[in-house]
Image (cartoon, rainbow, N blue to C red):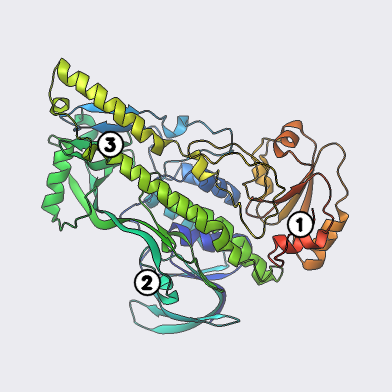
Amino acid sequence: MKTPVLVVGAGPVGLCVAGDLAWRGISSLEIERGDGVVTQPKMDMPHVRTLELCRRWGLVREVENAGYNRKWPQDNVWVTGLVNGYELGREPFPNCDDEPYPEQSPQRRERCPQNFFDPVIARWVGGFKEVDRRYFTELVDFTEHDDCVRAVIRDVKSGATREVEAQYLVGCDGAGSIVREKLGITMTGNAVLTYTTNVIFKSRDLSSKQKIKHGYRYIFVGPDGTFATIVAIDGYDNYRFSLVGSGNRADLAEDDLRAEIKRAVAGECEIEILSTMPWTRRELVADRFGSKRVFLVGDSAHQLSPTGAFGMNTGLQEVCDITWKLEAMLRGWGGPNLMQSYENERKPIAARNVREAAANLGRMLETRNRKPPPEIFQPGPAGDAARKEYGDWYTERMSHEWFTLGIHIGYRYENSPICVPDGGALPPLDVATYVQTSHAGCRAPHVWMKDGRSTIDLYGKTFVLLRLGAAPLDVSALVEAARRRGMPVQVVDINEKLVVDMYEKKLVLVRPDGHVAWRGDAAPVDAMGLVDRVRGAASEMPEK
């Protein structure tokens, strides 16, 4: 059988690759070794950029109403125990309904763990005739050729194999990626930060028995420092317990894990263990993100600690980057250098996010070096004073993890071969905050327009050439150059002060992924050179 794109893996990243391709009218075959049911939700917060993509796809309301208790408090809390224990500090956050929208985006982050998020995306993808999705099907092998990829897939139930010819293969098959293995791509970084074990458990009475004010995430500090976390995985009675562990592997039976949960809870409550999953927390980035026709997206390309909620959200940023490029190649207007730009753009971002996630873990575990004084576990004024001093220190250290808008929408493709910088000074990169800018390589700014739309809503399926101000410039040469190359461009005129001021230049060319390709106050001297540059068909910088 033949398909334009073979997508290996149907987790959230793989589903979004297939879905966004279908949204663009591109067919794919998507295979998944398992049944797609999430029993161990690893991701629990789609962040702002992910919700902007959901906005593009018309899925925001579905994500909001996927099943999480939107009235459940979202505080992060550090404690010695829940039922019988002490609070050391907390970072308060509103519940999902009251979460404010950042000024830099039309969307806010959402609490939608993977067991809720994946079904939303899977239903959406299932509505496209362009997607042939097959569960219980695995990739056996593939060979890459100049004009195609030939793969062998296998039905894991029957053992029957089948050959598939695809123009491109996208490996979204996770940390143990067979696609990465077959390409011979190694990873660089720390292969073991901690050996951790997750437990999904149900407790109908924990929330009523605990003395600690409710929150979303509880971090447990014992005499030897931080040892576990519990998160309210649905805001009702399902929880995820994580025994953080160390660099030493430990084989734990269910009774051992139940005892550790009781240690954290510090009291009696109902504990019904639903599933367990040992896993390794890593700090790794693939040395290459693919080849000519085969690409790694998501955990197959990078593995990072979940401290910061960067994992799936980084993968969705990659989806946004690669799908429009695949469409361009399949429709014939993408240039020979376009697909290489995926690695050029995304690998530095992945490396930054992996480092930041590991740093967040390091801060969470600083209590193992600066161990808590014994007084924090004792009642009375001396204990209260010790808890305040130690808790205030820890609260300050942990604040780095909670405020990361610069990671989620402030990333930029500074050295991209398909973006044309104008030499202007970029705002400094900052993890916690993001200053919007229309510099080439940056996500095009969000501004509310008079018709109620966000400027973000203008971008998605084609290049968009914004003509800003009261006297639109003549861009006929640029439009004609794009037409001759088959590159889709929509010209949009805007004369609204807020937009004009934010976008800074009279002309801004925005890519289908919503990142700025070029900007200027005059039409480009070499219109064809610019078109060739942004579609990956030129290596030299065109004249401005």
Residue under numbered circle 2:
136
Q: Earlier in the sequence, mark 1 or mark 2?
A: 2
Residue 248 quadrant: bottom left
Q: Secondary structure under badge 3? A: strand
Residue 527 quadrant: bottom right
Rendered residue at 27%/27% (across/down): 391
Please indicate, yes or no, whether residue 120 appears anywhere in the rendered image. no
- Going by the picture, which residue comes out furthest to the top? 381
Q: Earlier in the sequence, mark 1 or mark 3?
A: 3
Q: Amino acid at mark 1?
A: Val
| Camera-nearest residue between 519 and 459 | 519
Q: Are marks 1 and 2 in contact (CB under 8 Å)?
A: no
Estimate the x, y position of residue 505 in percent, counting from the top left. 76, 41
Q: Is residue 187 left or right of residue 296?
A: left
| Camera-nearest residue between 529 and 8 | 529
Estimate the x, y position of residue 240 in percent, counting from the top left. 27, 46
Q: CA distance from mark 1 to mark 3?
A: 49 Å
Residue under numbered circle 1:
489
Residue under numbered circle 3:
218
Q: Earlier in the sequence, mark 2 or mark 3?
A: 2
Rendered residue at 23%/45% (across/down): 202
Q: Secondary structure under badge 2? A: loop
Estimate the x, y position of residue 295 in percent, counting from the top left. 51, 68
Q: Amino acid at mark 2?
A: Phe
Reply above or below: 177 against 306.
Answer: below
Q: Are marks 1 and 3 in contact (CB under 8 Å)?
A: no
Q: CA distance from mark 1 to mark 2?
A: 40 Å
Q: Secondary structure under badge 1? A: strand
Quick one: label 1, few (<14), some, or many (20+) residues within 10 Å?
Answer: many
Q: Amino acid at mark 3?
A: Tyr
